[in-house]
Image (cartoon, coloured by chain):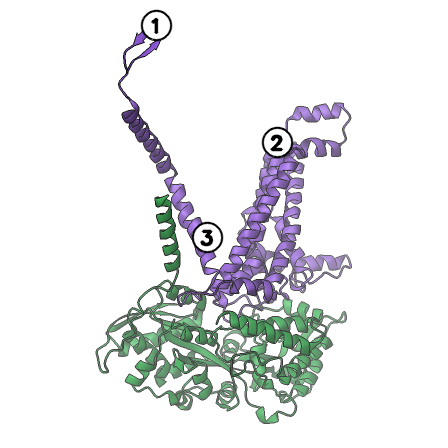
Amino acid sequence: MAATIAGVTRPAVPSRGVPHRRRADRRRWRHRLTVLSFLAPALIGISVFLIYPLLSAIYFSFTRFDLLTAPVWVGLRNYEHLFGSDQTAWKAAANTLWLVAFLVPARMLAALATAMLLTTVKRGGSVFRIIFYLPALAPPVAATIAFVFLFNPATGPVNELLAVFGVDGPLWFDSPEWAKPSLVLLGTWAVGDLMVIFLAGLLDVPKPLYEAASIDGASSWQKFRFITLPSISPVLMFAGITGVIQTLQFFTQAAVAASVASGKATTGGGISSTFGYPDQALLTYPMHLYVSGFRFYDMGYANALAVMLFLVAFAVTLVLLRRFRVFVTGGERG
Amino acid sequence: MKTRSLLAAAAALLITTACTPGGSTDTAVAPAGQDVSGTVEFWHFFTGREAKSIEDAVAAFKATHPKIDVKITSGQDDTKMLQAISAGNGPDVGLSYSTDIVGKFCSSAAWRDLKPYIERDKVDLGQFPDTVRSYTEYRGKRCAMPFLADVYGLYFNKKLLADAGYTAPPKSMAELSDMAKKLTKRAPDGTIEVAGFVPLLNFYENVPSHMAPVWNAQWLTGEEKSAIGADAQWQEMLRWHKDLVDWFGHDNLVKFTSGLGDEWSADNAFHQSKVAIAVDGEYRVAFLREQAPTIDFGTAPLPVPDGQQDRYGAGYVTGNIAGISANAKNPEAAWELVRYLTTNTDSIVTLSNAIKNVPSTRDALKSDKLETDPHFKTFLDIFAHPKTATTPPNAAGPKYVELTQEFVDAYLGGKHPDLKKGLTDLDTRIDQALELGR
């Protein structure tokens, strides 16, 4: 075949379609394999440690399973128990949501305040940074035990100090009303991790913005509201979302505080007196999940609880991302 | 598309087969008289001084069974054992502190049915008291053997009682209530300095499961449903505790107990004379000798409610139990160890003398070698009392006990003003929770 363009006759080109396509396909596959081989470690990790357990958890949540015998399909029974009759689950969920509502903002505020304070320090800033960061290095179990002893209503120095001022201190970790606020105090003490992130964000805010605002007569609050906050909003978004997710999984500090405060930090005597002490005030949702699975052998039900936790965490994250995006972009949608 | 379908099918297959109990469960029993050898992996929960005594007992076993080697792992709790059995790596022999697991381990076959071994070796189960036999089997299936027992009674500080004009411990709940008030010392600001008796049902060993037998309060019906709401004894028991808690003031008691030492340390409140009368197990005798040798104390059965004087002397009994994992690698040698530890009189007596637990066989109880000072004899008598009881085994484990504990803590803290209604609601919760595992 020949083609004629403007009177010029071009020689017929041999058909290149099939071999060219093959070469292109081979190149494409080689490229895909290269990409895949680079991604393989992450993909294997995600598949084995995330996708597979997640799918397993969903499957087991529809079964009666005790780890010892083969799972038996029970349909929606575990979910019916969760939504219909398990009062403890709702109490545990309420406790966890309380912590999300108070612990996360308290930690963020404490970390932000500390970081802002550190930006104003002219000399010895690095020393103060280390001092304020140090609590974050304390192992959670040790820190919690220490806090429970400090706040012991009978022998703790906190109540002794309050007594000096004529204040009859509360029962702290031994009181259903004060146990969760005591955990918030513990959480705000160890904010070094957040503080470091906020500090980096604050130091990144361009100085000329503050200078310009000063020239325009802006107050400190106005500078904070209209310069600092918008500038560090991505950092706040990160801290907020990770804080909510971590608090939804809150376990160690609540379990240790309850066990130590109950005076039964030992195996052998059952755990309902310790987990959740006092009066279920410190029973978080993941703790209830653990008890259901490993104390009561209701592993199928524990998986149903886990699936619900996953769904709630996922939904909350989506909502927060949406909310924060509005905040970060100053209300612009799109 | 085809590849994706295959991957999905493979994933589904993996999901349905993974994480289910692993390991072989060959239940064949060798003919009688065969030579047994090999290694036995033995997990137990004891630590420290008590773990050393277990090692001594195993050393005595090895001396009489030279072809069997025993690998001991101490400090292992039920949860670890459960996970190990589930993963196919369970120990050959497991020793648990809790009879709560018997129902679950028997019904799920996590521990082997020991009947073929018992029949083959003609082990006389009549040597175990009835209550002990009841907490080591579930619905006729024996998957555990009793390994010493724990019996609960009353400890009283003789000096504190004498200071208040008492020469004998209380025998009735009314007496205990009066003595608790008279023995209590308060600071001028009302703070409790010494409590005659701590009526909170989550203090040390003063818990519902240990007190219910004293009141003859029943846990479950024959159909394994909660009997608590319909049993008036539960209301009697809880009202008695609540009245005394209210006399102290709940917050005062909580503040007082929060400042007391750990139960298992030398700072135990009874060791420190901070509590005059306490509920505890027979093992406290050994702890007191070691950690507080100067305390002048006495032991007695738990007091009984008015109108139930014929029950005085009975109490709560539980015990340690031994079983062979479904996936034991050397079940025959494991059975040799279990049989020795649970039926050999010398071994039981030696261990009982060492860790001051109650022997679980009649022969060991009658043994001349058993050290029975007056303190310890109280518990031997409680153990032998025909009305001494335990918590009934259940396929759902300790669920009903723990839900009750949760309710009782709330009630004594001032919640559930309508006790009868609260207990009826508790019945519903327990039944629903038990049903979940069926």
In this view, the residue in front, B280 or B273, is B280
Q: Position of residue B224 (x, y in %)?
A: 52, 79
Chain to which the residue tagged by mark 1 belongs:
A
Amino acid type at circle 3 is Leu
Q: Which residue is mark 2?
A: A203
Q: Residue furthest top?
A: A7
Which residue is painted at 68% across and 81% down in the image? Answer: B240
Quarter holding the N terminus of chain A is: top left
With B210 as the anchor, is B411 left or right in this view? right
In the image, the chain rendered in green is: B
Query: In this image, A172 relative to B359: left or right?
Result: right
Residue sitting at x 39%, y 78%: B144
Q: Residues within 10 Å of mark 1 (few under 14, many from 20)?
A: few
Q: Which mark is residue A54?
A: 3
Q: Chain of mark 3?
A: A
The residue tagged 1 is A7
